[in-house]
Amino acid sequence: MTVIPGQRFSFCGSAGRVFFLALIALVTLHATPASAQPASCDPAYWRSMSGKAWMEAQREIAQNQNIIYKPDSVLEYTCFDRFLSVLAGRAPNMFSETTTWGVIPGTNMVVALQNLVGTTLSSYVGSNFDHNFLGGRSNVNYNPGAVNRSTNYTCDMMSRAWAAAKCLNFVQQTPVNRTGKDDFFNLNWYESNDPRDLPTSMAACTADPRWATKRDVALNTGASTYIEETFNVYANHFATNGCPAGAIPTGVVVTLVGKAPYNEMVCINPGCAFTPPNTCAP
């Protein structure tokens, strides 16, 4: 290829093509490389965050449902069968068993209240609240009895339930076998356990099978993983043992009489002082 000043030239011929390819290679080699995609933009990274959020939410739900007790029955708290007994003892004089017109033997009111209310009361409480107070955590319980004649009413069940609840603070009282369940657990524990097993008369919750998968995704150990970025946490700048951070120049040059000039520096670790020319020491 011959180049004459003032004239156009072309890359015709093998020599011209070689020159053209070499020029392209030279430009390519000196081109600025594209920035790498940060790990935070990786979809797998966001799936990992989603998995961690799922586990945190499930742990909070399970723990709240475990610690917040199943409500007790007001019929138990008020000893409702004793209300019926008082009614059976006082109502006959006003209704069917009144002696105003003569003596009527028998206990018709007791039988009527037992058949109408008492039997249903016992069945309802036994089917829905057949456990101790406070969702099975307390040692206190109440079982409605049969209706009888009574002229007075006493019941301290609500007071006893409150006293038991006031003293339960993430611990258990014997004979309730719950020690070690009313606690705060890490995420790995929930993979094989679920604290929601009270009342014992009802079906306990089993560990959710999704925990293992969510944990792998969150810990970036599953099938879909992202590349972790390299970062500096600057932990050595906050260390209190030794002076690992090193001296940091301030930009000021210090000149002392009779000594060579040196760059002023500071040491940021607690208990460290700067010793010229570039040392941090306790």
Image: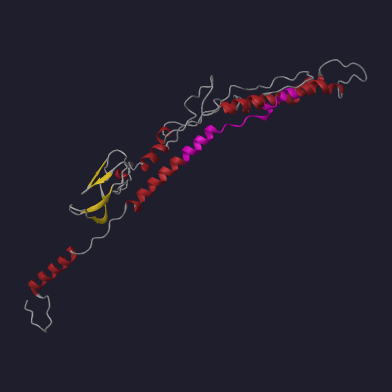
Q: Camera-side residue: 280 or 95?
A: 280
| Residue ID at (68%, 22%) | 144
Answer left or right for 243 relative to 127.
Answer: left
Image quadrant in which the C terminus is located: top left
Majority SS type along the magenta span: helix
Instruction: Name the spot of residue 85 as percent of width and height, x first.
Output: 76, 21
Drawn side of residue 79 relative to residue 214, left or right: right
| Farthest-out residue, front | 257
The vertical placement of 35 against 166, above or below, is below
Depth check, front residue: 277 or 17 = 277
Task: Give the residue furthest to the left.
Answer: 2
Magenta segment boundaries in residue numbering: 57-83
Outermost residue toward the right in this view:
101
Where's residue 252, x and y in %? 26, 56
Does the stretch in magenta take in 61?
A: yes
Q: With respect to residue 247, does 92 lie above or below?
A: above
Was residue 268 drawn as part of the magenta stretch in this picture?
Answer: no
Instruction: Identify the residue shown where x is 10% and y is 70%.
Output: 19
Task: Report which quarter residue 245 is drawn in.
Answer: top left
Q: Residue at x 72, y 19 (%)?
A: 146
| Quarter of the rendering containing residue 186 | top left
Q: Position of residue 255 (x, y in %)?
A: 22, 55
Give the x, y percent position of residue 254.
Answer: 23, 54
Q: Nearer the viewer, residue 232 or 64?
A: 232
Q: In the picture provided, is 106 more to the left or to the right than 242?
A: right
Q: Which quarter of the image is occupied by the N terminus?
A: bottom left
Q: Is residue 76 positioned above or below 230 on the image? A: above
Q: Is residue 166 left or right of residue 107?
A: left
